[in-house]
Image (cartoon, helix red, strand yellow):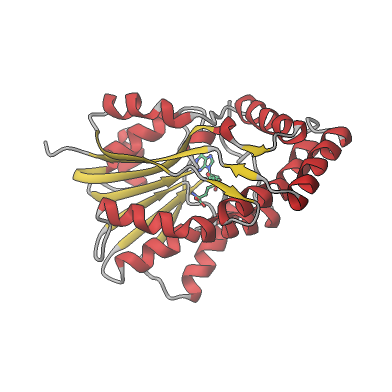
């Protein structure tokens, strides 16, 4: 299946949501980069950068003497990032339009990303959307220098996403999302397959941790889930897989959660830090 379109789209509503999402996950992101040793002067990749909210932070981190190459296959997102980088005079930030879901030959990688010598790569919420994660993993492994590190934030099990007391509307939404992404070539439980693929590329796991959260309705990660529920059902409806009755059942669950003590459980997100060993 072609991987030239992002299943959640590139409309302004999704761009804005990605910005709010990054703000909520920013502290976890910066902590992951600290653990990986990402620092001033380094050359770092952002794989599947989207509109670049994290790439801008990466560029601040490496400073003027470093380099960030932000890669995505969605031109509207790259244009947004280029404007933001220009406004902030972050000349160390470059963008590249490339399909990361298809195998690239060594010559293409050399011509686009450059020779293996990157100090690190950041990859969040990309692997779950690419039909061929082996290609993505191979590219990341080839691009890193010995000792270079890849930081992944991806889901290991998406259907832990729940609201308790459990409502039928939200459970159905979760199942429909999973089916929709799978039908578009993605895998919302991708992190469970990544270790085998990375080990096959000679990469070694440095650390792994859970980023899963369980919070009451007003908590930041719970608000992140509610934010997603305010936009994505419309996209499922536009794709013809979400009915008026489904939406009413979901809204009844959300209404209940506003007026009763409730707990939100996020999809099971994990952090993995991998290293390319010295030759
Ligand atoms: C959920 S967004 C995540 C964006 C960013 N990593 C972040 O954490 O905010 C997924 C991104 O992956 C990009 N993407 C999906 N499939 C891709 C592919 N085959 N090649 C390159 N980028 C892809 C989309 O265009 C989108 O920007």
Instruction: State the count of labels.
Output: 0
Would you say residue 103 is visible in this rendering? no
Q: Quadrant of residue 134?
A: top left
For image coordinates 83% across by 39% down, the residue present is 247
As displayed, is residue 54 above or below residue 262? below
Q: Position of residue 142 (x, y in %)?
A: 27, 37
Nearest the camera: 65 or 269?
269
Would you say residue 3 is visible in this rendering? yes
As displayed, is residue 272 above or below residue 17? above
Residue most toward the front? 261
Residue most toward the right? 244
Q: In this rendering, would 135 be left or right of 171?
A: left
Q: Position of residue 167 (x, y in %)?
A: 74, 34
For image coordinates 53% across by 28% down, the residue present is 187
Q: Quadrant of residue 94?
A: bottom left
For image coordinates 80% across by 48% down, the residue present is 255
Q: In this rendering, would 30 be left or right of 186?
A: left
Query: Looking at the rendering, in which quadrant would you find the C terminus?
Result: top left
Q: Position of residue 92 (x, y in %)?
A: 35, 66
Nearest the camera: 107 or 71?
71
Nearest the camera: 32 or 79?
32
Q: Position of residue 235 (x, y in %)?
A: 74, 41
Q: In this rendering, would 230 be left or right of 81?
A: right
As displayed, is residue 26 above or below residue 168? below
For image coordinates 41% across by 45% down, the residue present is 123
Query: Looking at the rendering, in which quadrant would you find the N terminus?
Result: top right
């Amino acid at each position: 299946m072609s991987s030239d379109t992002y299943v959640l789209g590139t409309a302004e509503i999704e761009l804005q949501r990605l910005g709010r999402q990054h703000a909520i996950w920013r502290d976890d992101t910066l902590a992951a980069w600290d653990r990986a040793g990402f620092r001033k002067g380094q050359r770092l990749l952002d794989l599947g950068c989207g509109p670049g909210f994290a790439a801008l932070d990466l560029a601040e981190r490496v400073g003027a003497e470093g380099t960030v190459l932000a890669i995505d296959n969605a031109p509207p997102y790259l244009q947004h990032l280029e404007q933001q980088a220009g406004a902030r005079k972050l000349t160390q930030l470059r963008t590249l339009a490339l399909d990361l879901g298809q195998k690239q030959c060594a010559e293409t990688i050399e011509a686009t990303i450059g020779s293996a010598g990157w100090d690190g790569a950041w990859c969040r919420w990309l692997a779950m959307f690419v039909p061929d994660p082996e290609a993505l993993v191979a590219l990341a492994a080839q691009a890193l220098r010995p000792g270079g590190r890849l930081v992944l934030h991806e889901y290991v099990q998406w259907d832990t996403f729940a609201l308790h007391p459990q409502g039928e509307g939200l459970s159905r939404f979760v199942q429909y999302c999973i089916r929709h992404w799978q039908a578009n070539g993605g895998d919302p439980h991708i992190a469970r397959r990544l270790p085998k693929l990375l080990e096959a590329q000679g990469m070694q796991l440095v650390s792994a941790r859970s980023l899963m959260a369980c919070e009451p309705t007003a908590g930041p990660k719970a608000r992140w889930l509610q934010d997603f529920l305010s936009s994505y059902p419309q996209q499922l409806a536009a794709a013809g897989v979400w009915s008026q009755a489904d939406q009413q059942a979901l809204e009844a669950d959300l209404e209940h959660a506003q007026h009763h003590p409730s707990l939100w459980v996020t999809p099971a997100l994990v952090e993995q830090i991998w290293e390319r060993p010295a030759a």
